[in-house]
């Protein structure tokens, strides 16, 4: 019985050691950031959409910072990080998506689009400039101002995940 326990202990130790190891570009967290990249910075994402939600710029800017702080080993810096993110909110629209009888919409859609630019002096291959778009549908009977904050949170989370995937996981 003791020999079985010893074997299981050794196997468990080996498994833990293997999962803790990482090779140059791939970390156990799932990121594939170049090991030369040690810092990141995020510029304020200005809202240039035709409709401006007052907290959207701050929400997206802070969510990007928090995502990289919590899911990478990169250190945040105010300016000129090894990864430097900048961007603009270019679309914020509410539109009907399905009609009921009498031309009334039963569902509406909030769509948010963000242009993002990543510059990296230490990893030119990771650089990109891309527009990320996401949306959430909501019942047209609901007052938009009552659901707007929750919709912004959900859409921002999806946008930030897409930005993270593009820059840190290379999806």
Image: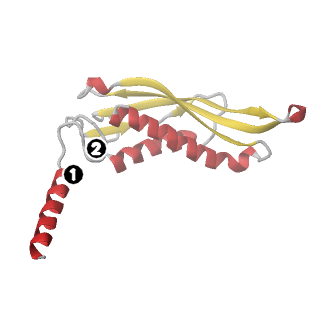
**In the image, is 60 to the left or to the right of 40?**
right
Q: Position of residue 121 (x, y in %)?
A: 26, 26
> Circle 1 sits on which residue?
19
Mark 2 or mark 1, earlier in chain = 1
Quarter holding the C terminus is top left
Question: Relative to residue 163, is residue 141 drawn left or right?
Answer: right
Please tell me whether residue 81 is drawn above or below residue 126 in the rendered image: below
Residue 33 position (above or below residue 126): below
* Tally of marks: 2
Q: Is residue 71 visible?
A: yes
**Residue 120: % across, % down:** 29, 28
The structure residue drawn at horizontal position 10% and vertical position 76%, both measured from the top left corner, is: 2
Residue drawn where x is 51% and y is 40% of the image: 158
Distance Cα–Cα, label 2 vs label 1 = 20 Å
Q: Which mark is residue 82?
A: none
Is residue 43 in view from this perspective? no
Q: Residue at x 19, y 57 (%)?
A: 16
- Quadrant in which the N terminus is drawn: bottom left
Along the line of sight, the residue nearer the viewer: 1 or 83: 1
Say which mark, if any, is on residue 74.
2
Name which residue lies at 77% across and 47% down. 143
Q: Position of residue 41 (x, y in %)?
A: 35, 38
């Amino acid at each position: 019985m003791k020999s079985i326990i010893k074997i299981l202990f050794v196997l468990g130790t080996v498994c833990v050691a293997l999962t803790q190891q990482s090779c140059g570009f791939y970390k156990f967290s799932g990121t594939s950031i170049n090991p030369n990249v040690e810092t990141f910075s995020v510029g304020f994402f200005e809202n240039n959409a035709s409709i401006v939600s007052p907290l959207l710029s701050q929400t997206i800017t802070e969510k990007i910072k928090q995502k990289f702080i919590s899911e990478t080993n990169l250190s945040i810096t105010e300016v000129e990080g090894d990864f430097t993110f900048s961007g603009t909110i270019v679309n914020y629209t509410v539109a009907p998506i399905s009609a009921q009888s009498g031309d009334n919409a039963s569902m509406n859609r909030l769509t948010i689009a963000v242009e993002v630019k990543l510059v990296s002096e230490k990893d030119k291959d990771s650089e990109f400039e891309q527009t990320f778009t996401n949306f959430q549908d909501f019942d047209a009977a609901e007052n938009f101002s009552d659901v707007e904050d929750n919709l912004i949170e959900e859409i921002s989370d999806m946008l930030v995940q897409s930005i993270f995937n593009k820059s840190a996981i290379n999806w």
